[in-house]
Amino acid sequence: MISNDMREGRKIETRGFNMIDFKVFFPNVVLSGECAIENIAGQVKRLNGKNVLILTDYNISKLPFMSVVEDLIKKNGFGVSIWNKVLPNPNLATVKEAIAFLNDNNCDLVVGIGGGSVLDTAKAVAVVSKNEMDIEKCLGLFNIKKRGFPLILVPTTSGTGSEATHISVLVDENTNQKVAIYSEYNMADAVIIDYRLTYDLPPNITAETGLDALTHAIEAFASKGANLLSDLFAINAIEMICGNIVNAYIKGNHDKDARKWMALGSFYAGIGFCSAGLGAAHGLAYPLIDYGLSHGRSVGIFLPWVMEYNLSFAKSKYAKISKALDKSFYAITESEAAEKSIDLIKKIIKNLGISYRLRDYGIKTKDLDDMAKNAFESSKRLLDFNPRDISLEDAQSIYKKAY
């Protein structure tokens, strides 16, 4: 149906994405499978690269497969420069240093190989350097003007889903606050998901990054921004992750199927939350970094408590989660099934050897209100997607229940 405004040629104010049902961004090419990394030179060629910047962290740069990747690219006639200085929670200065290295070596294509910190940094380096803008001007929603250098992302963990998103999360070292670049130009030109690169992840990294992926999927599924397409990816991610995370944690490289489904589940969850947004488990978790807790463990701590808080507002979605995981729950009421979903998630977290009680991490009761206030004030965009509205008092209450 055509509106009168359209018939008469009047300008329609769309205010960004407010008048559409949903938005979704996809990487241009996704290659998934055991040995998928062996296709990397073909992707460099497809993207017309000549001098490749491989961006990673120190530990990954010393792993045997990295020399294999370097040789695959070099023997096809491409130059390779390696920058391995990405740290956990990379800041703006990290990106600026990497950009200077890219320019000094005349690189024209970026390959990010690593976990979420590496992939977020690679995305920022590729897009900021090509746009020739100060990174501070690139922060926020859709401030990038054009595509960056060609970008290939290779995840080595099954958790962040960064390879699937248009977001680079960084730290502003001047304020010690998390900031982000959101742009359709921040998507990868190619994603290579090679399950072998996750086979030897230590159990604690498997558990913590897996919990991050699971939280992505559940929060995307219940988000106010959820839509038909994000639901498709999120519910499949929940099934993949819940069905395999404990085996991947316990059996490691002895259960290659579990590693495969965790890698795909993480990617699916990334597509889901990229479209739908996240929620309060992510929004409230940020202050735990000051206690040395990883991001994955932090969001995992809050996941069951936030689900309890959201229960009456996300009953239908939570019931679908439990029924997807256990077909016997089709025989009970929706309310009962929704409650069962929380029990299932708590059981998984316990089986990963992780406590979801703040008291077990040395956090003091006197600090809870201030931590909740810090999270509330710095995470409004995340909290806005939560299925149930959250006030400062609500955030403080969730912190106290989680204690």
Image: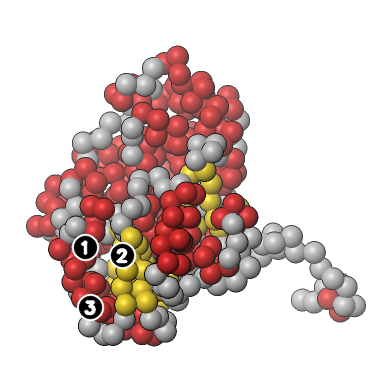
Q: Amino acid at mark 1?
A: Leu
Of residues 230 and 143, the one nearer the viewer is 143
- 10 Å crowding of disc 2: few (<14), some (14-19), many (20+): some
Query: Which residue is disc 2 drawn over?
Result: 82
x%, y% of residue 377? 59, 33
Q: Residue at x 21, y 36 (%)?
A: 353
Amino acid at circle 3: Leu
Q: Is residue 71 above or below residue 166?
A: below
Q: Is residue 278 above or below residue 234?
A: above
Chain-order first, disc 3 or disc 1? 3
Q: Position of residue 221 (x, y in %)?
A: 46, 53
Q: Residue at x 39, y 70 (%)?
A: 105
In the image shown, does 343 or 202 lie closer to the viewer? 202
Q: Which residue is mark 1?
A: 197
Distance from label 3 to label 1 (Cα)?
16 Å
Q: Secondary structure at mark 3?
A: helix
Q: Is residue 31 above or below residue 287?
A: below
Question: Which label belongs to residue 72?
Answer: 3
What amino acid does circle 2 point to?
Answer: Ile
Q: Marks 2/1: CA distance?
A: 18 Å
